[in-house]
Amino acid sequence: MEGWPPGDILPNGEHPRRCFLWPDAEDNRIADRFDAAFNAIVAGDMIAAELAIRSVAVSYHVAHRWSICAGPNSATLTWDFGPDDVPEVPRSERANRRFSVALTREVEARDGHRCRYCGLRLLSSEARLKLHKLFPVATAHRRRINTERNQGVSLLFACLDHVEPWSVGGRSDADNLVTCCGRCNYGLGDYSLRRSGFVDPRRYSPVVDDWDGGRRILAVKT
């Protein structure tokens, strides 16, 4: 497996870690609000659903926690144990970085719609698109100004992460991909797990429970 064995001691004297930041009470509250929004949509109460979504639209807490995981140049949490021995692969020789809907659906479902690093509950990619179709203003998350961005959607945005980095030839298949939150994804950047002092997330079984990432709303006709 990639990464460090859990019981090792790293060069800085620390133990290998599984993520940058574990979900806290506010992160979980935001996921709960989206859960309430999904239930309201299924029940046909679009007003309650939008109110739940808007209740997490602006969160200094989320913006701050994002800022300290803003890529490998973040001095707050990033450990850098030097360049990897594996050279980068020319872009022309790398695997396709675009994931099919079917592959994305397979990996997200396998991982219980949670980040395999920190365990944060995430929005299913298809459910997020459905939410944006239903509430385009309330769910806007790509705006440059924090106060105009739904920080809750940004927080729970699901990515697929290459465990063996794409830049060194990592495959774009289900064996090498894990569901990942934006903080962990951007925090790791193109660093390998060993360079970042991380344990391979595939050492731990995914948590699969009644959290469906909002997929229950996909059957709702609009």
Image: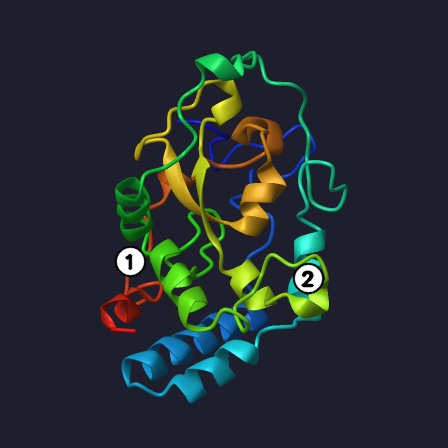
Which image quarter is the C terminus in? bottom left
Residue matched to label 1: 208
- Report helix, strand or loop for mark 2: helix
* Residue shown at 59% from the left, 18% from the top: 84
Residue 130, horizontal then vertical, whole percent:
37, 64
Residue 113 seen in render: no
Of marks 1 and 2, the one in the foreground: 2
Q: Residue furthest right?
A: 75
Which image quarter is the N terminus in? top left
* Residue shown at 56% from the left, 65% from the top: 140
Residue matched to label 2: 63
Q: Check disc 2: other Cα within 10 Å, few if <14, some if 14-19, many if 20+.
A: some
**Disc 1, disc 2: CB below 8 Å?**
no
Q: Amino acid at mark 2?
A: Ala
Q: Residue furthest left?
A: 219
- Report helix, strand or loop for mark 1: loop
Residue 72 seen in render: yes
Is residue 4 positioned above or below 219 on the image?
above
Residue 218, horizontal then vertical, whole percent:
27, 66
Q: Distance between the Cα atoms at labels 1 and 2? A: 28 Å
* Residue shown at 69% from the left, 45% from the top: 77
Residue 27, horizontal then vertical, whole percent:
55, 67
Q: Check disc 1: other Cα within 10 Å, few if <14, some if 14-19, many if 20+.
A: few
